[in-house]
Amino acid sequence: MKTSKTAGTSLEIALSKYCGPDDVITPIQLDDEAVRASLGYPGPQNYLKRRRQYTPRDHFRLMRGRKAPRTFYNHIPARDVRARVGKAIWESYLKVSIVRNPFDYVVSRYFWAHEGQEVSRTGFREYLMSKPKVLHKNRRITHIDGTKAVDFMIRFEHFGDDLTELAERVGLPRDLHAEFSALGAKKGVRPPHATTDEMFSGFSEGIELVCAIYEEDIAEYGYAVPSG
């Protein structure tokens, strides 16, 4: 389950190296696809709907020149994955995702969403309070009806240790983290000085909002709450 702003694209590229012809690989942004292609890794495959699965709406969209309908796509929610792979696969496969300190996540997302634009601490506060739905995005990917649907969570802050543990568990090379680290997709947008403490300083409303939505993660993974 690929969450947002958690280095998921780099991991996706690294894992595609080990995919076979029957595995599902969903498309990513063109510049990231170029990186994947340059490494000689398999690209998007088995993600489109089969024609016999088309609905009348799918046929109508195709007639209007829209993209072919997809069964699987980037950042697909757990609920949709469960519905589309079937009970046997859903219950027997290891479901993996990435979790990140929610305060760090929302700061990163702000700078990503405003790349090339004027940014400020005031702008960040206005963004968070006017768009609280951004905090729910990853919840919709990893949870179903408020319950976590993931078996193994890679902690963004301990990526090396957790990815090595995952690799050993599923039979991938122990140096998978080294391959992942060499990619670094979508880095360099957030300035070094924009720490969570700096961006949330004096912003008690924002802290309360994040705590309310991510209470589970803060408790389970011991994430520090900015002092405000």
Image (cartoon, rainbow, N blue to C red):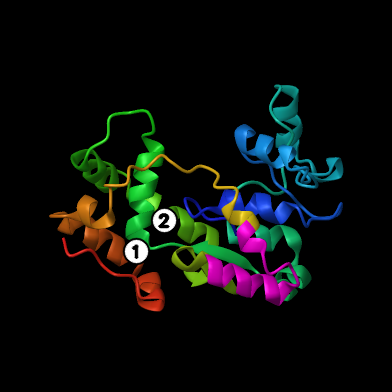
| Kind of residue indicated by mark 1 | Ile
Q: Is residue 116 visible?
A: yes
Please tell me how crowded label 2 is: few (under 14), some (14-19), or many (20+) other residues with Cα within 10 Å.
few
Could you tell me which secondary element the residue under label 1 belongs to?
helix
Residue at image point 74% right, 28% down: 62
Q: Is residue 8 left or right of residue 135?
A: right
Residue 213: assigned label: 1
Residue 136: assigned label: 2
| Residue found at the far left of this picture | 202
Q: For marks 1 and 2, give the CA distance.
A: 7 Å
Q: Quadrant of residue 126?
A: top left
Q: Quadrant of residue 64?
A: top right
Quarter the N terminus occupies: bottom right
Quarter the C terminus occupies: bottom left
Residue at image point 69% right, 49% down: 72
* Magenta-drawn stretch, dominant element (helix, strand or loop): helix
Above or below, 187 against 207 in this view is above
Q: Does 65 appear in magenta?
A: no
Residue at image point 73% right, 72% down: 170
Could you tell me which secondary element the residue under label 2 belongs to?
helix
Residues at marks 1 and 2 touching, judged by CB atoms closer than 8 Å? yes
Return the x and y of residue 172 as percentages of the image width and height.
74, 68
Above or below, 219 against 172 in this view is below
Q: Magenta stretch: give its range.
A: 160-178
